[in-house]
Image (cartoon, grey):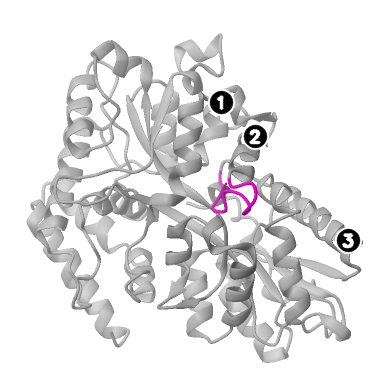
Amino acid sequence: MTGRGLRVLAAAVPVALVLSACGSGDSGGGADGPLVFWTIEDTADRVRAQERLLAAFTEQTGIETKVVAVAENQLTTVLTSAAASGELPDVIGSISLPIMSQLRTDDLLDTDAAKQIVDGLGAETFAAQSLELTREGDTQLVVPSDGWAQLLFYRKDLFAQAGLPPPTTYDAIRRAAERLDQGDVAGIAASTTPADVFTHQTFEHLALANGCALVGDDGQVALHSPECVGAFQFYTDLVGEHSTAGNQDVDTTRATYFAGRSAMVIWSSYLLDELAGLRADALPTCPECQADPSFLAKNTGVVAALSGPAGGEPTTFGETASFAVLKDAATEDAKKLVEHLMTDGYRDWLAIAPEGKVPVRAGTKDYPRQYVEMWRGLDVGVDTKAPLSKFYDAETLRVVQESPRSFSRWGFTEGKAELAGAVAGQLVVPKALADVLNGGGDAAGAAREASEQAAVIAQELGE
């Protein structure tokens, strides 16, 4: 779930029109023209913010720049066209892990530049997991910039009244769902729609907690492992017995929690500003919210890292966004731009959408907490702006800002990023879950079905 799906409108822009923003014959920066910066943060307000950021860089360095917005779901197509016409950019911002993997497969990344930037900034100033997820072996592929976390939001007031601890483990989640599932309030709202990648993300978040991996130590698909069977069992029991009836998706889970009709919901950190009543078309509607639109925010706690009975260290499903310097770029100028965006310009970069841009660089060598402390005070919201610290207590914000330290993803650290992307894109897990939830099988069968389908995909990919 990136940017709340706000890129849907931009996806309708024809490829030729998107490319025309590069100008005629602008192939990268340097002596031939301005430094070209592509971004998939493509809504109008975010593009303007990035133009201001790069204008400040130009004023500081004298290096001319050009911002080109590209819809995320068009990026692969646009890159292919740009490569054929010699119009590749120098830098691409906000790329996701799957896009990073594709750029690596297509041999478009200047990995030496990425390493030099990270080393210059200080690898120790980054969340270790952000570097691990953006490396291939010892090769630093891109420069991680920020991320959003999949979070378990829960009603602190209801938990306190019931004497329940925060839902940080399978057992605590299960007990809370059972105890608080009463009357018009469901224990939890979690995605079940088989045609929605959000269901995959939600499941992977819980599966990672139980040590369920896409592939085993031998590199073979392992979704039928005991850890994965346990994750399928937990998920189907949880939503089958204690969630809202019917298929649930990214919109209905939010609406259920906002109406005060579930005690927990699994959603991304993009929920934080909406929960505070700062987005007019997605306002909380609970009875108490009429008098106090921020009621839910004040009474909501969050958990990032979860653990299951078969898992190890608590983990969080999260998306790490990065800056990519491309081969044949104006390398020195491109490096200066990325370094600027990760230092003097970092505050304004994160301010584009703080709820979805949690800093993966906590601070500098001299001021190790500079950026995470600054992030707390950034304004969030769409129609109304206010800092997160106005609505959330210090502990809640600490959990969110520390979440990149526990980020994990299927396949990326095992060299199976392409397989992971294909399994998610083809909705292998959501379809297997749906079979169980619709009464067509059991958890072991769902895990076996998902594993078999993933193995077929791996074979098709030549893995």
Disc 3 residue type (three-letter): Gln
Q: Which mark is residue 51?
A: none
Rendered location of residue 410, percent (x, y):
32, 63
Instruction: Tell me if residue 340 is in the magenta stretch.
Output: no
Rendered location of residue 316, percent (x, y):
36, 49
State if disc 1 and disc 2 touch (CB < 8 Å): yes
Give the mark, 2 or 1, whose residue is nearer the N terminus. 1
Whether 176 is drawn above or below 16: the answer is above
Whether 239 is drawn above or below 36: the answer is above
Which residue position is annotated with label 2?
Answer: 381
The stretch of residues the image draws in magenta is 356-368
State if disc 2 and disc 3 touch (CB < 8 Å): no
Gap between marks 2 and 1 measured at Cα: 9 Å
Work out whether residue 296 or residue 252 is closer to the camera in this orientation and state it: 296
Gap between marks 3 and 1 measured at Cα: 37 Å
Residue 18 shows in the view: no
Which residue position is annotated with label 1?
Answer: 276
Drawn side of residue 449 relative to residue 407, left or right? left
Drawn side of residue 128 relative to residue 453, left or right? right
Q: Which mark is residue 60?
A: 3
The rendered magenta stretch, by its main secondary structure, is classed as loop
Give the mark, 3 or 1, whose residue is nearer the N terminus. 3
Residue 158 shows in the view: yes
- Classify mark 3: helix, strand or loop: helix
Q: Residue furthest top?
A: 291
Instruction: Tell me if residue 362 is in the magenta stretch.
Output: yes
Q: Residue at x 55, y 66 (%)?
A: 73
Q: Residues within 10 Å of mark 3 (few under 14, many from 20)?
A: few
Q: Residues within 10 Å of mark 2 (few under 14, many from 20)?
A: many
- Classify mark 2: helix, strand or loop: loop
Disc 1 residue type (three-letter): Ala
